[in-house]
Image (cartoon, helix red, strand yellow):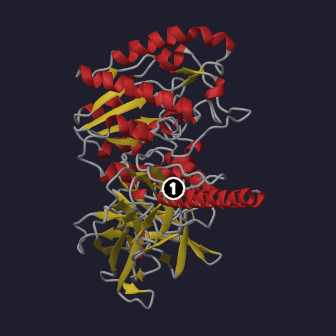
């Protein structure tokens, strides 16, 4: 009886173990069935860090892809929802809610353009000869910078003053080192200007160089030679060209300094020079009442992206230039717009009908400079949303000169000096050449046209909308800058109204909204002025012809804990709140119209 019982127990235990094992097998098979393989198919011009991954149905998977230079992931053939974004040169592909085993192909865009340079009467300085071809990666900068050219070609008795799309100079002119739109390929011809006869110049020779002391010619176009008496021209003395009747002057690339009053009272309308000059200031051209156009050629590598974040303004203008003719919402202001517009939120709200562009830059740099450039690239399809900072004399255009702080602009213009040639410098209350000189004084070697700005934390300051893409979630202990609520700032906005008129004459609609106000930073004795300032703000802007005030200042009040590093840069969550206020106000106005 015991043996039977023991045998029964053994059989029972074996049965239980077998059942457990079978259950385990079923569980194993069920577990295996809950995972599936997602594959990024390999192809040309890119590498996938790990092209095959196991995930559970309904999950999300991210692949890291590194395209070759000049290429970018444009789309994937995944039928569901996906996102494309980047970390430096790495493209991240996020497939969302994957329900079945999937094999995904990538579609790449080739971000490269080719420019052929023709000597056009010049001689080669390299073994490449009179025809030189260069290929440019436009992954980061959508309009390439052309060759400086003085290292490619030369021509005895002539100065290379730029490139042209036609050999006779009748096409589109492009300054040396400036940017150009290239659809696929482009041919540019060297533009040469013959030196004015040496007999018209008075000069001294000292320390192996020629310094011009006088001029007797009467040519309409003055092209100062690079060599006089067999020596390089490095300086121009005071009054050397006083009263000169030339309408246009080309300075040589050898020139180092121009003394003050050198062109005093000259009839100049246009000045062409190179950015290796060491001393040039407005006082060199005192009483030159007709001088309106500056054409600056690069002869040295740029430095802006190594120096200041405002250098991305050149890229923002590329966006503006290449989207002309589209329906656009152009957001403009100081830092409080640059940092605080969340581009994706604006795109989600308006992207079906409008292209979103954030053209804002540093609020203490010349807003007149920026607005004068903006109006060169707008059409009747555009809406300009301006958020002037309430205590910024630059943003309100109550100060219209340029000064040392405008090196923030020059580090951007260095990447496309041709933008400067679009301005009539007479609109400024001085300081244009002086501010350039101050920037050139700070310039150091080491930059390249292909550089992309990153701050000390590796943050980029520019995305497809011109917005700042990085997350700001940690406030700094101390904030810089200040904000005031003084009625005097809004006393006379006539110059700003005049600038608005240039836009409205082209059919551009202008919506004025508000920049953020850090009420905790306002001096204690001015905190009670908010209501008065809001009323004055409404009174002034509502009275402007063709301008629509769409917001109330009181809605845009924030507190110290909302800010990142200055009283104009909001943390990401408060910035999203500010963006949603702009979206609300714009939608209300569009609906009303």
Estimate the x, y position of residue 363 in percent, counting from the top left.
53, 35
Residue at (43% x, 48% y) in the render: 265
Estimate the x, y position of residue 463 in percent, counting from the top left.
45, 50
Estimate the x, y position of residue 519 in percent, counting from the top left.
61, 18
Q: How many numbered discs, if any? A: 1
Read off the residue under disc 1: 262
| Viewport quadrant of the C terminus | top left
Q: Would residue 61 appear left or right of 171 to someone viewing this image? A: right
* Mark 1 closeness class: few <14, some 14–19, many ≥20 residues within 10 Å: many
Q: In what element is the residue under mark 1?
A: loop
Give the camera-side residue of 163 and 186: 186
Estimate the x, y position of residue 588 in percent, counting from the top left.
31, 21
Give the camera-side residue of 535 and 422: 535
Residue 29, relative to residue 320: is it above or below? Answer: below
Residue at (74% x, 33% y) in the render: 477
Give the camera-side residue of 187 and 349: 349
Residue 588, relative to residue 161: is it above or below? Answer: above
| Viewport quadrant of the N terminus | bottom right
Q: Would residue 592 appear left or right of 260 to someone viewing this image? A: left
Residue at (23% x, 33% y) in the render: 505
- Residue 266 appears in the rendering: no
Q: Which residue lies furthest to the bottom in this view?
A: 127
Q: Would residue 473 appear left or right of 91 to someone viewing this image? A: right
């Amino acid at each position: 009886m015991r043996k039977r019982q023991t045998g029964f127990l053994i059989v029972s235990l074996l049965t239980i173990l077998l059942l457990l094992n079978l259950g385990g097998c079923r569980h194993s098979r069920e577990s295996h069935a809950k995972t599936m393989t997602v594959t990024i198919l390999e192809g040309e011009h890119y590498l996938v860090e790990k092209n095959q991954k196991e995930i559970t149905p309904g999950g999300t998977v991210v692949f890291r892809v590194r395209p070759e230079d000049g290429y970018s992931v444009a789309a994937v053939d995944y039928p569901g929802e996906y996102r494309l974004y980047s970390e430096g040169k790495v493209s991240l592909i996020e497939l969302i809610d994957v329900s079945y085993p999937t094999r995904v192909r990538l579609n790449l865009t080739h971000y490269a353009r080719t420019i052929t340079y023709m000597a056009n009467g010049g001689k080669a300085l390299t073994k490449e000869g009179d025809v030189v071809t260069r290929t440019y990666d436009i992954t980061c900068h959508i309009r390439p910078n052309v060759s400086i050219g003085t290292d490619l070609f030369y021509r005895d008795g002539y100065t290379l003053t730029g490139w042209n799309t036609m050999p006779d100079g009748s096409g589109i002119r492009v300054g040396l080192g400036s940017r150009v739109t290239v659809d696929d390929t482009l041919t540019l011809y060297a533009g040469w200007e013959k030196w004015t006869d040496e007999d018209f110049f008075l000069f001294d020779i000292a320390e192996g160089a020629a310094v011009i002391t006088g001029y007797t010619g009467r040519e309409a176009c003055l092209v100062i030679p690079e060599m006089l008496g067999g020596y390089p021209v490095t300086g121009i003395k005071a009054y050397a060209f006083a009263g000169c009747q030339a309408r246009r002057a080309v300075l040589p690339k050898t020139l180092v300094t121009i003394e003050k009053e050198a062109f005093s009272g000259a009839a100049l309308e246009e000045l062409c020079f190179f950015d290796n000059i060491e001393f040039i200031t407005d006082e060199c051209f005192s009483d030159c009442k007709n001088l309106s156009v500056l054409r600056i050629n690069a002869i040295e590598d740029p430095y802006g992206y190594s120096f200041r974040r405002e250098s991305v303004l050149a890229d923002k203008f590329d966006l503006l230039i290449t989207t002309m003719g589209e329906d656009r919402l152009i957001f403009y202001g100081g830092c409080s717009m640059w940092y605080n517009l969340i581009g994706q939120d604006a795109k989600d709200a308006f992207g079906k009908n409008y292209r979103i562009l954030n053209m804002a830059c540093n609020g203490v740099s010349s807003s007149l400079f920026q607005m004068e450039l903006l109006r060169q690239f707008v059409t009747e399809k555009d809406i300009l949303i301006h958020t002037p900072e309430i205590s910024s004399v630059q943003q309100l255009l109550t100060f219209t000169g340029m000064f040392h702080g405008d090196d923030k602009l020059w580090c951007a213009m260095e990447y496309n000096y041709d933008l400067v040639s679009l301005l009539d410098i007479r609109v400024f209350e001085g300081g244009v050449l002086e501010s350039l000189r101050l920037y050139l004084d700070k310039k150091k070697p080491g930059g390249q046209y292909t550089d992309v700005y990153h701050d000390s934390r590796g943050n980029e300051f520019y995305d497809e909308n011109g917005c700042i893409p990085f997350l700001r979630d940690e406030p700094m202990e101390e904030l810089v800058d200040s904000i005031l609520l003084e009625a005097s700032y809004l006393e006379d906005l006539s110059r700003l109204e005049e600038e608005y008129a240039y836009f409205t004459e082209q059919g551009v609609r202008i919506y004025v909204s508000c920049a953020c106000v850090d009420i905790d930073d306002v001096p204690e004795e001015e905190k009670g002025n908010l209501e008065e300032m809001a009323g004055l703000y409404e009174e002034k802007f509502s009275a402007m012809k063709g301008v629509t005030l769409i917001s109330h200042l009181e809605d845009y009040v924030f507190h110290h804990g909302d800010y990142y590093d200055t009283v104009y840069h909001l943390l990401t969550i408060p910035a999203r709140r500010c963006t949603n206020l702009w979206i609300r106000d714009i939608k209300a106005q569009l609906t009303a119209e």
